[in-house]
Every structure is written in C-alpha cells, then in structure tokens.
Amino acid sequence: MADMSRLGSLEREVMEQIWSASKPISVREVHENLARNRDIAYTTVMTVLDRLAKKSVVRRIRDGRAYRYEAVATKDQMVADLMHEALADAGGKAGRQAALVRFVDQVSPEEAKALREALEKLERRGDAR
Amino acid sequence: MTPVILAGLGLLLAGPVAGALARATWPAQVPRAAIVLWQSISLAAVLAVLGAGLSLGLRIVTHPSPSTLEIVAHLLVMALTLLVLARLVWASVRVAVRTRAARRRHRMLVDLLASHDGTDGAERQAGSCAHGIREMSGLRILSEPTPLAYCLPGLGRSRVVLSDGTLDHLDRAELEAVLAHERAHLRARHDLVVEAFTALCEAFPRLVRSRTTLQQTRLLIEMLADDAARRRVGAGAVARALVTLAGARPPEPVAGLAASGQGTVARVRRLAEPEASRPVLSMACYLASAAILGLPTVAVAVPWLAGVVEALAR
C-alpha cells in the first residue's frame, strides 16, 4: 500500500515534468530531472512512464532506438475534461452517473429563486449557525 | 390462482403503489426507512412477477395428461420468465462492470491531476479549514474555478473531490457540511443502493415506475446524507452550501435537470424544518417493508410449493 502511494506520487511528479516540457521528453531527461534532488533508479522512471502510457495519459513517440513521451493533453485541458465528465448530467446514461455521487446538481433560475426563499425562511428561524 | 395473484401483486407494487409512494411527502421525514420500503417494493414486485411466470410454467408438471399445445404454451411461459430473470442479471452485471470501470478511470485521473490535501489550493481560502480537512484521507482538490463537489465510492479507495471554486465559494462551516455529507455517502455505501436501482431501471426501462423509483431513492439518499451533515454543522450551513453550489453556474439545458432541481428545492425546504424524529412512522415503514416482502411468500408461494411437492410425491 505504501509502495502504491509512493508510485502514485511519483506518477504525479513525472506528469508535471512532461506537462512542463516544451517537447516530447525522454526517459533519460525525466530521470535526470528527478535524480537532482533524490536517489532514484532509471528503471523506476521507465516503469512509471510505462504505467502512464498504459493509462493513456501519455503518448509514446519513437525516436531512433528509444522512446519519447508527451502528454495526451495539457493539464488544464485534462482537468477541464474531468470536470465535464463529473458534471455530465442525469439526462445522460444511467451507468455513467452511478460512478460518482454529486453533492448537488445545478438548478434552473426559477428553482434558484425557490432555493433562496427556502434558505431565507431557514435563516429567519434563527437556528442557522 | 397462484400466477394471477402473483402477477397482480407485481403490477400493483410496480404501478400504483410505487406511484403513490413517489407522490407522498412523508418519506422525506424518514428517509432511511423509506429507502428500505422502496427496496422492499421493488424486490417484491420482481419476485412476484418471476413467481407468477414460474408457477404458471411449472403447472405442466402437475398436469395429469397435458396435450402438446399445453406443453408448448407452458414452456413458452417458462422461457419468458427466465428471459426476464436473465435480463435483470445481465443488467446488474453490466451496470456493475461499467460503473467500476468508469470510477477506476476517474479516480486515476483525479489522483493524477489533483493536489492531494488541498494545501496549495485551500490555504489561501482559510488556513484553519485546510487544517480541518487535511486529516481526511481520500480528499482531492482540483484547480478549477467551477464549483463542484462529489465523491467516488469504493472500498478503501474512495475519494471526495472538490474544486478550487468550491473552496472559494464556501466558508468553513459550509465546507464541513459538504465533507460530512460526502463522508456519509461513502461510509454507508449509498452508491450500492443506487446501483441496484440503476440496474433495475436499465433492465426494465419502460417498467411502470422504474425511473421514478431510481429518482426517488437518489433523493432520499441525498436527504439521508444531508441529515448526517446537519447533525455535524447545523442545518443552516448545509442549506447554504446547497444553495451556493446549486446556483453557482448556469445550468446546462439537459433532460432530467428539472427533476433534480426540484429535488434540491425539496432538500433545502426540508432543512428549513426542524429535524423530525418520527419513530412510529419509521417503524410502520419497516413493518410495511417486511410485510410486502414476506406476506406474498407466506400466503402464496408456500401453499403453491406445497401443492407442487404433494403432486410430485403422488
């Protein structure tokens, strides 16, 4: 379990490297960057990049006899996509929405008005903290 | 008579009974018991329909001298019944697999894209708040201005996901309300209840009330989690968090939104009332659930089974 979470944080670090690189980056470059402030094996970096490629968040590009890696999208784009998925509404496929449970869904302007009225009523009652 | 009674019971439960329960306002006062009642009604309806088909189909076994036509007709009924059962099983498996796959991928992306404990995002909002929520494992904060809060259930791998926008819009008590709400979902595995009703709805989308049932149980589960949050931080904070996050962005014009919006209004109105303790009502609800499931079994299935056994023994 500890190993899994270590791999997880390593994956995030490697992704940050890839996102901040201006062009596809090689295993060696990632390793050099990471090895600056820690002791890390080259093969570990390779494993992490391999895992990220399997998760389809990075793309492998052949460069001579080695591979270079680039992210499938910018970090902002991926966050935006993720949010979009999380927001996909109840009108969508039933199975999709069973994956996550939202705190609250968006409401129409009329409903927003009804909500504010209900809230006012609650606050008037004075037990609101 | 057995098949007729069972089929009638199934239709009654899936139609008028479910309809009446959906229109009733009292379930919101006893959400937990009402969820059990919904489960009982749905399960009893499914069992009754299956029982009707099986008892009709199996009648051939006890028939003294069946004609070919009778044999074919009864086999057809049996096949149909088994088809209904297969459809239900298939839908359950499909929903379970799809839900878990979507969740796994979503969790992987959240873990990759989020800051882990909200320290970089949350600190500027309120140091004390970040301190309060940091101890919660599985919390992920996405740097995204759109306010959003949700949870990804999973045994030992659950996540609560907030956005920077949520931290910006809510004060400390409201944020704690959101977290308490999500924790209640995760602790009680509310997702499993929803999953079962999702499967039912997917197996029989046009079954009289399967979509209503799904919507109603979803809403009751939200109310249950609201209550958990209310006990922790007070009704005011929960309601303010709901109203703030529900109105934070313009709604996307999609089908089904109206229903969920109505549900949100119901949740806030409910919070405006003092928390009701209705032991009699909830006890009645539990008894009704047990009766709905148990009575048909005792009154119909047992005599029928006894009859079959007796006929076979002869």
Image: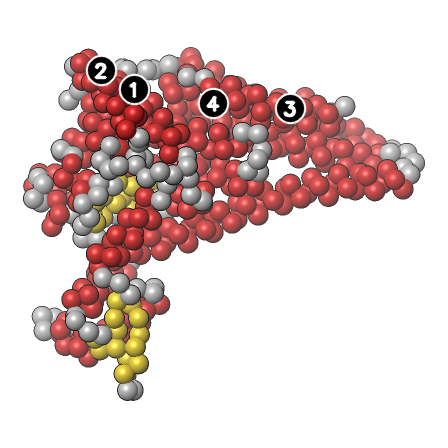
In this rendered view, identify the residue nearer to me: B82 or A82: A82
Element assignment for label 3: helix
User: Does mark 1 fall on the same chain as mark 2?
Assistant: no
Q: Amino acid at mark 3?
A: Leu
| Residue at the spot 35% in from the left edge and 44% down from the top edge | A88
Residue B282 seen in the figure: no
Q: Which residue is mark 3?
A: B9
Q: Amino acid at mark 2?
A: Lys
User: Does mark 2 fall on the same chain as mark 3?
Assistant: no
Q: Position of residue A107 (x, y in %)?
A: 30, 31
Q: Which residue is mark 1?
A: B269
Q: Amino acid at mark 4?
A: Ala
Element assignment for label 2: helix
Q: Position of residue B261 (x, y in %)?
A: 34, 29
**Contact (CB < 8 A) between labels 2 and 1?**
yes
Please state, as top left, top right, bottom left or bottom right, where the C terminus of chain A lies in the image: top left
Please state, as top left, top right, bottom left or bottom right, where the N terminus of chain A lies in the image: bottom left
Residue B183 quadrant: top left
In this rendered view, identify the residue nearer to me: B32 or B11: B11
Q: Is residue B87 left or right of residue B226?
A: right
Q: Which mark is residue B203?
A: none
Q: Which mark is residue A121?
A: 2
Tell me the colour scheme of the image: secondary structure
Residue B297, placed above or below residue B197: above
Residue A33 quadrant: bottom left
